[in-house]
Image (cartoon, rainbow, N blue to C red):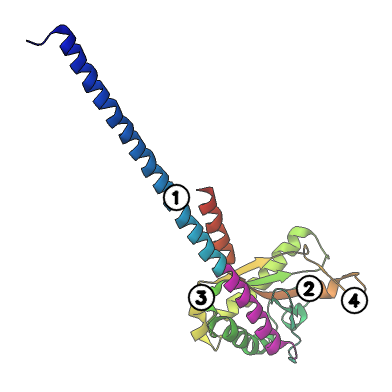
Amino acid sequence: MTTKYGRLFKKEQEEDHFWPSFTDLLTIILLCFILIFIAMMIIKSLQIEEMKKTIDQLMGVRSELVNELQAEFSDSSMGIEVDKETGAIIFDTEILFPYNKSELKPDSFQFLDEFVPKYLDILLQSGYEKYVAEIIIEGHTDRDGGYLYNMELSQDRAYSVAEYILSDDFPYQNIQEHLKDKLTVNGKSYTDFRTDDEGDYSAKASRRVEFKFRLKDEEILEKTREILKE
């Protein structure tokens, strides 16, 4: 017959056997969490490293694009200026528009027929298309008139250029499909005015249309921020 003390001794043995097992279980769970955490940190580190490599690659693409655009247009007789830092193509609006108007001049169509295919051949037909997120046509004005008036004028001018390029009258319609997913039209009013060689405000230089491109580095940087937040 089991005595009272025998039962108590047996119960203590069972409790002694139970607690070490429970402690081992907690240790195993903690180790699992640590391993999962380490694995997640390694994965995120690899993701960020891969994005850094992609950004470095994009910086190389930007430099190559700017160089190609300069080689194509810097010595051009078309009156085009290439920004050495951004690759933006800048030309006086007098090439395209009468003063204070947003309707294209009759001879501006020939200018666009010559310029646009050369420009897009570099951006979209030279292996760069997968890196280009956006192609922007941007209108700028001088300070004559109010801000909102010039905002509308600059927007209408940029839109007129885009409208012709995407119209049935444009002779290179095979380009249009490439543009539809990337083309953006902006009006900047007189906020981004230009100066002359002496650093003084120039109304003539401020009246212009720019063709610009944006690479996919912004999307990659945003994705990196999201990973870091997580």
Tell me, yes or no, whether the two marked residues, 3 and 1, touch with CB atoms within 8 Å.
Answer: no
Tell me the CA gap for discs 2 and 1.
57 Å
Q: Secondary structure at mark 3?
A: helix
Tell me the CA gap for discs 2 and 4.
16 Å
Q: Secondary structure at mark 4?
A: loop
- Mark 4: amino acid: Asp
Question: Mark 4 highlights which residue?
Answer: 197
Task: Report the label total.
Answer: 4
The front one of 118 and 42 is 42
Question: Mark 2 highlights which residue?
Answer: 207
Give the mark, 2 or 1, whose residue is nearer the N terminus: 1
Q: Residues within 10 Å of mark 2 (few under 14, many from 20)?
A: many
Give the mark, 2 or 4, whose residue is nearer the N terminus: 4
Q: Does the magenta portion include 184? A: no
Tell me, yes or no, whether the two marked residues, 2 and 4, touch with CB atoms within 8 Å.
Answer: no
| Residue found 44% across the figure and 50% down from its top | 38
Looking at the image, which residue sits at the far top? 4
**Could one spot residue 216 in this view of the protein?**
no
